[in-house]
Image (spheres, grey):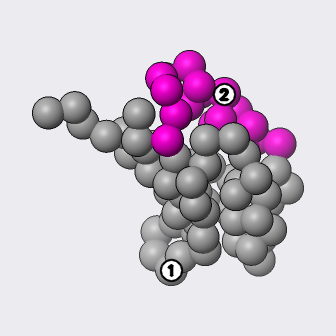
């Protein structure tokens, strides 16, 4: 299941959050961005339970504030 996460961070924490997110299983790439989000994350997991676990692991990262999940539509 392909998903994009738009992560918001606390001020000045984009690089730290991006680096830490990159180490999480299922994350293909994470990088700081300009715009409404601070970090863009490309994720590939097998199901919603694995996605949930991945998102819960974000809560432990210093500087993490919130995220929006964009889950691939199956067509």
Let me know if residue 50 is in the magenta part: yes
Looking at the magenta stretch, what is its main secondary structure? Answer: helix
| Residue 43 visible (yes or no) | yes
44 over 39 or under it: above or below: above
Q: Is 67 left, or right, of 73 in this rendering?
A: right
Q: Residue furthest top?
A: 49
Q: Give the residue at x 60% y 70%.
A: 31
| Mark 1 lies on residue | 34
Name the spot of residue 27 as percent of width and height, x first: 61, 49
Q: Is residue 73 left or right of residue 3?
A: left
Image quadrant holding the C terminus, namely top left
Residue at which label 2 appears: 53
Who's the residue at 83% across and 42% down the image?
60
Q: Position of residue 22 (x, y in %)?
A: 70, 57
Separation of residues labelled 2 and 1 (CA atoms): 26 Å
Residue 32 vertical placement versus 19 (above, below) = below
Residue 58 is a magenta residue: yes
Q: Disc 2 or 1, which lies upstream in sequence?
A: 1
Tell me the number on the disc at residue 68. none
Q: Farthest residue toward the left?
A: 75
Q: Looking at the picture, does residue 59 appear above or below residue 28?
A: above
- SS for dot 2: helix
Mark 2 and mark 1 in contact? Answer it, CB < 8 Å. Answer: no
Q: Secondary structure at mark 1?
A: loop
**Residue 63 spot, x, y in % from top left:** 79, 60
Is residue 5 visible from the viewing direction of this image? no
Near-viewer residue (26 or 48): 26
Q: Which residues are magenta?
A: 44-60
For the N terminus, the quadrant is top left
Query: Which of the two marks, 2 or 1, is nearer to us in this view?
Result: 2
């Amino acid at each position: 299941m392909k998903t994009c996460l738009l992560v918001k961070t606390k001020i000045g924490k984009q690089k730290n959050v991006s680096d830490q997110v990159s180490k999480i299983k299922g994350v293909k790439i994470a990088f700081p961005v300009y715009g409404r989000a601070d970090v863009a994350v490309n994720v590939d997991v097998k199901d919603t339970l694995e996605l949930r676990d991945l998102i819960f692991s974000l809560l432990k990262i210093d500087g993490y504030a919130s995220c929006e999940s964009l889950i691939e539509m199956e067509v």
